Amino acid sequence: MPDLEIARSVKPHSIQAIAQKLGIAPDELIPYGKFKAKVSLAVLARLKTKSLGRYILVTAINPTPLGEGKTTTSIGLAMGLTRLGHRTAVTLRQPSLGPVFGIKGGGTGGGHAQVIPMEDINLHLTGDAHAVASSHNLLSAFLDNHLFHGNSLSVDPARIMWPRTVGISDRALREVLLGEGIGKQASQFVITEASEVMAALALAGSHSDLRNRLGRIVVGLKKSGAPLVAEELGCAGSMAVLLKDALFPNLVQTLEGTPAFVHTGPFGNIAHGNCSVVSDAIALRCADFVVTEAGFGSDLGAEKFFNIKCRVSGFTPSVAVVVATLRALKLHGGGGVAKVGVPLPTSLTGPNQDALSKGFANLEQHIANARAHGVPVVVAVNAFKDDASTELEWVRNRSLEVGAADAAVSTHWADGGRGAEQLAAAVVKVSEQPAKFSHLYELSWPIRKKIETIATKMYGAAGVRFEPEAEHQLEMAEALGFGQLPVCMAKTPLSLSHDPSLKGRPTGFTVPIKELRILAGAGFVTAVCSGIQLMPGLPKKPAGERIDLDPVSGEIVGLS
């Protein structure tokens, strides 16, 4: 049965009933219809002295282009924990319209491990992404208007860093030429999920924090070489007003009625890849266990979770769940190629112990990455229908041999929370062990050393090479006083390296850095690896071609 039909086959609970499961009071809920709501930050003040639940991070190995079920595992694990009697919530990012209509499709899970209402979450939900785009582009308009009306702040038009944003993948907007009033200035668009405003929203802990972050955004440089910040253009307050309601996290539910927060959407490969700090803050005060997902593999979203998000929130994880599939491990072992829209070869779907054994090295690195931060690991072997039980068990046993605290086969896609009960039991057991969480690097280190540490420790690189423009930008960032910010790496998710064709656990490679961006409002610098685009393009056969409205019922069809 298609995911959309499964989602529609379930009768959801009222959003008031879901809130009640977490002890959220009716006057702390802002309903958007029957099955979704925003939650007021007043709940944080009411529960400020309450002890926190256990914080469970879900990450993964480097995926195939099809994805390995990290979102479904997060949802399934939360439902499994609920079935074992634990008050649980799951916190996720909102899907981006770019992938929904592009190469990936929706991001609400699949099979019997979904969050609902599926259509709303995959599309506009409560309008947060549109608020981010409006806030971002308001700053762009104020900047251009300032230049048009005389440039009293002596902005250097040649050193403007602020792009524009749009929520749909559109490669034609990667490079644009702006016209009237500013003299044919070269610029670009980034997708909304790569916007610094999205990152600031995700990391803000309050409206005042968000307002301050927006004011600190570096728009460009003045002719004196000093940074120009949004506060000086007089629009940071208006930007905050556009985001007033967007800061409140969105509450929905899983197919089995487990509470779920879906809020903010920074990508894991080009942004920091985690849901909002405020959604986690509320969930941790309302639940015994909070399952949260970080984008892509441990080399991307989890590393940024540990070293960016956890620094901001002050929360520390009890367990890291690393998701793996047989097909991805076999791909990393040279067993074949996976392409979207093309049936997988039997060398990936059928028995192939040789490729599985070789590809396991990729999983081994991801286990090591979490343990490098002092966090114990549970491996979740996400099982598909035709997977060989002997191979699933081999991965489980081998994971224990290389340092995982526990490992379990999970069938949540087919069986919902029941299929994740063994995984949930393993997580509970491991979470009772004391974690010794630590960051990978010190903020006082030079930016170059932080980047080199991430590349060598998390990716297994031999070193890093900075292109001339990146060298200049690195020196400028440190000269302007931004050297003590954490680093957000932008690279391919399909390999531990910067090169998507390097599978398994490559060694001896050098990571090329083409650009360094200052995101002072978000609170980090972004190091962009060669080959990365901040504006995705649509594939040859976009998912949007399948999406339509049924002419009789008026319902959405084709969403996946």
Image (cartoon, helix red, strand yellow):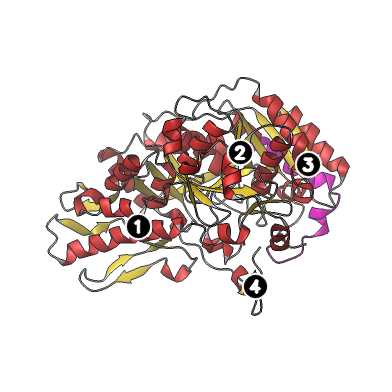
| Residue 180 left/right relative to 38 | left
Asked if the stretch drawn in magenta spans residue 440, the answer is no
The x, y position of residue 245, in whole percent, is: 40, 51
Q: CA distance from mark 4 to mark 3?
A: 32 Å
Q: Which secondary structure type mostly characterizes the magenta part of the structure? A: helix
**Looking at the image, which residue is at 14% across and 56% down?**
154
Q: Earlier in the sequence, mark 1 or mark 4?
A: 1
Q: Earlier in the sequence, mark 4 or mark 3?
A: 3
In this figure, which residue is indicated by the disc labeled 3? 418
Residue 229 visible, this orientation: no
Which amino acid does the dot numbered 2 rest on?
A: Lys
Q: CA distance from mark 3 to mark 1?
A: 43 Å
Residue 136, numbered label? 1
In this figure, which residue is indicated by the disc labeled 4? 546
Which amino acid does the dot numbered 4 rest on?
A: Arg
Q: CA distance from mark 4 to mark 2?
A: 37 Å
Q: Nearer the viewer, mark 4 or mark 2?
A: 2
Q: Residues in magenta? A: 338-366
- Residue 11: image quadrant is bottom right
In this figure, which residue is indicated by the disc labeled 2? 21
- Residue 361: image quadrant is top right
The x, y position of residue 447, in whole percent, is: 38, 37
